[in-house]
Amino acid sequence: MTALPPAGTSWREYGLCAQTDPELFWPEKGSSTAEARKICTACEVRLECLEYALTHGEPGVWGGTSENQRKAIRKARRRPAAA
Ligand code: SF4
């Protein structure tokens, strides 16, 4: 179990990407996102990051997903639940 961040801090301050090469998370079109997504798997704020990117339509790698993966998640969430 992870401790909650102290009041007044943001989940962003806990992101592992802040300790690595930021360019990995903003790859040029057609470049691999695998290395950045691998870093995200060990990040304790991955879910917060993913929800932020889904809500705000951010480009790049967020929450362990590529832009195309988030597009698929948003599309799946819009689908009505099966009866
Ligand atoms: S999940 Fe990935 S992109 Fe999001 S804060 Fe963590 S390392 Fe950065």
Image: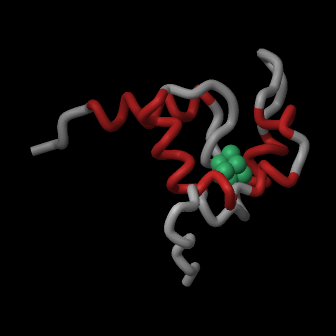
Residue pictured at 57% horizontal, 56% vertical: 10
The answer to whether 72 is drawn above or below residue 16 in the figure is: above
Q: Is residue 44 left or right of residue 33?
A: left
Residue 71 position, x and y percent, is 49, 27
- Camera-side residue of 9 and 30: 9
Horizontal and vertical percent for residue 61? 68, 36
Q: What residue is rendered at 57% in x and 28% in y?
A: 58
- In the orientation shown, which residue stands out farthest toward the front? 8
Residue 28 position within the rendered picture, expressed as x and y whole percent measured from the top left: 82, 19
Which quarter of the figure is the N terminus placed in? bottom right
Q: Is residue 31 above or below residue 38?
A: above
Frontmost residue, 15 versus 39: 15
Residue at the spot 79% in from the left edge and 44% down from the top edge: 36
Extreme-left residue of the structure: 83
Q: Quadrant of residue 33?
A: top right
Q: Is residue 32 left or right of residue 62?
A: right
- Residue lying at the far top in this picture: please name it: 29
The front one of 68 and 36 is 36
